[in-house]
Amino acid sequence: MNKQVTLDTTLGKIKVEFYAEDAPRAVENFVRLAEKDYYNSTTFHRVIKGFMIQGGDPKGDGTGGESIWGGTFEDELNPAATSYQQGYRKGVLAMANRGPNTNGSQFFILLEDTPNLQRQYTIFGHVVEGQNIVDKIGDSIVDPELDRPITQVVIKSMTVIDKK
């Protein structure tokens, strides 16, 4: 699946591309949800300064979302994969989960290299344009108890394109 997705947010555009060979199910899930407008009007509901921004929950509070297969799907954590070996670096796109094999629709983008993050999150892509927008979202003022931005950052739409 040789695609790119542009996230059009209230703060600007972020373009991501994928590690389709390393995480084919996560990539298919994200792209198909984007094509179905699943992520439209959702928010980055969790922001932890210096760590990551998280989105993809239609409920907007971190408790919702499901995969294209309904429910969740298994992790794709292959130590031989290039993305796994490169690890959790700034700009990485990974599946958010509640524990092993609980991937649904939620995802996060790293704000910094995070080498000590436990290897339990499937890396399936990375930012190729708009890291400055990711950083701007990461600078949001948040409710300290919920890590939720005081001013919502909305994903207005996602556009899927064939990578050239």
Image (cartoon, rainbow, N blue to C red):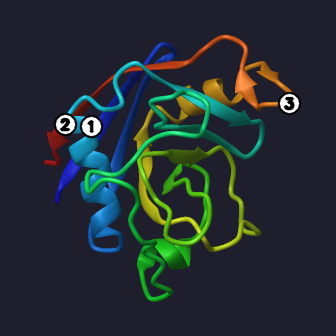
Q: Is residue 135 visible?
A: no
Q: Which residue lies most toward the bottom here?
A: 80
Q: Amino acid at mark 1?
A: Ala
Q: Which residue is mark 2?
A: 35
Residue 128 relative to residue 117: left or right: left
Task: Give the mark, 3 or 2, whose residue is nearer the N terminus.
Answer: 2
Residue closer to the observer: 2 or 72: 72
Residue lying at 63% horizontally and 74% vertically, measured from the top left: 119
- Element carrying mark 2: helix
Q: Which residue is mark 3?
A: 145
Q: Which residue lies most toward the right here?
A: 144
Residue closer to the observer: 47 or 2: 47
* Structural distance between the alpha carbons of marks 3 and 2: 33 Å
* Structural distance between the alpha carbons of marks 3 and 1: 30 Å
The x, y position of residue 99, in whole percent, is 61, 66
Residue 5's label in the rendered image is: none
- Image quadrant holding the N terminus, namely bottom left
Residue 18 relative to residue 88: left or right: left
Within-10-Å neighbours for mark 3: few <14, some 14–19, many 20+: few
The x, y position of residue 76, in whole percent, is 42, 74
- Element carrying mark 1: helix
Q: Amino acid at mark 3?
A: Glu
Residue closer to the observer: 40 or 98: 98
In front of the other: label 3 or label 1? 3
Q: Which residue is mark 1?
A: 34
Dividing the picture into quadrants, the one containing residue 97 is bottom right
Q: Amino acid at mark 2?
A: Glu
Q: In the rendered image of this protein, does residue 1 appear above or below residue 46?
A: below
Image marks 1 and 2: residues in contact by CB distance under 8 Å: yes
Task: Give the mark, 3 or 1, whose residue is nearer the N terminus.
Answer: 1
